Image: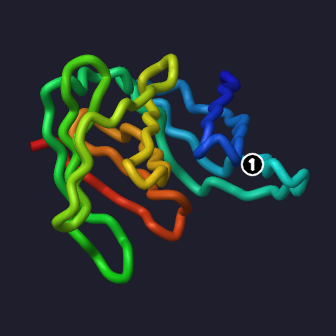
Amino acid sequence: MNAKKLILLVVSVVILVASCRKKDDPVAKFSNCKIAKKVDTGQSAIATINSGYFVSEPNIALENTNWKGTLQSSGLVDFQLKFLPSIKAEAKVGSATDFNLPYSRTTNGGCLRFKDNSNIFYFGVITSATDIKGSRYTSDYPFQITRQ
């Protein structure tokens, strides 16, 4: 059994560190992982991941791609991201559109972060070549988008 560590930076406030044992299979599935969660207030907690998998190719090209889905905000609203050249994005929430938003990605490319023109942060995790899941500001406003 190999041990793997998965580190995610969530909206630069919560850092999740999971230490998991994986079965020797090409899908790299894992289960029953413990997560230590430390918040910038100094509070910490333990949670359990019941199941999941490691994304084999998180560093997909985003430039010149369109993504559509929904965002939870007083009900479901349409949410679209259009990734432009020069690490810029266009975000549309309902009928409001923000243009030329710079975004950043983690070193492995699996996570992205940007803020809209109202300085509200968005955080997303590339879960496959066609799906991104994340949240707007807090986990109370989740979104899921699919590559078009």
Relative to 91, is 22 on the left or the right?
right
| Residue position marked by numbered label 1 in the rendering | 34
Secondary structure beneath dot 1 equals strand
Give the amino acid type for the residue marked by disc 1 in the picture.
Answer: Lys
**Most extreme residue toward the left, as rendered?**
148
Q: Residue at x 73, y 35 (%)?
A: 19
Q: Residue at x 24, y 21 (%)?
A: 61
Q: Is residue 7 visible?
A: yes
Relative to 73, is 138 on the left or the right?
right
Residue sitting nearer the eye, 42 or 2: 42
Q: Is residue 69 above or below residue 2?
A: below
Residue sitting nearer the eye, 116 or 4: 116
Q: Is residue 53 above or below residue 2?
A: below
Relative to 17, is 134 on the left or the right?
left
User: What is the x, y in percent for residue 43?
Assistant: 88, 57
Residue sitting nearer the eye, 82 or 116: 116
Specify the quadrant that holds the C terminus.
top left
Specify the quadrant that holds the N terminus.
top right
Q: Is residue 27 visible?
A: no
Kindly indicate the quadrant of the structure image that contains residue 72. bottom left
Q: Is residue 109 above or below residue 127?
A: above
User: What is the x, y in percent for residue 54?
Assistant: 47, 33
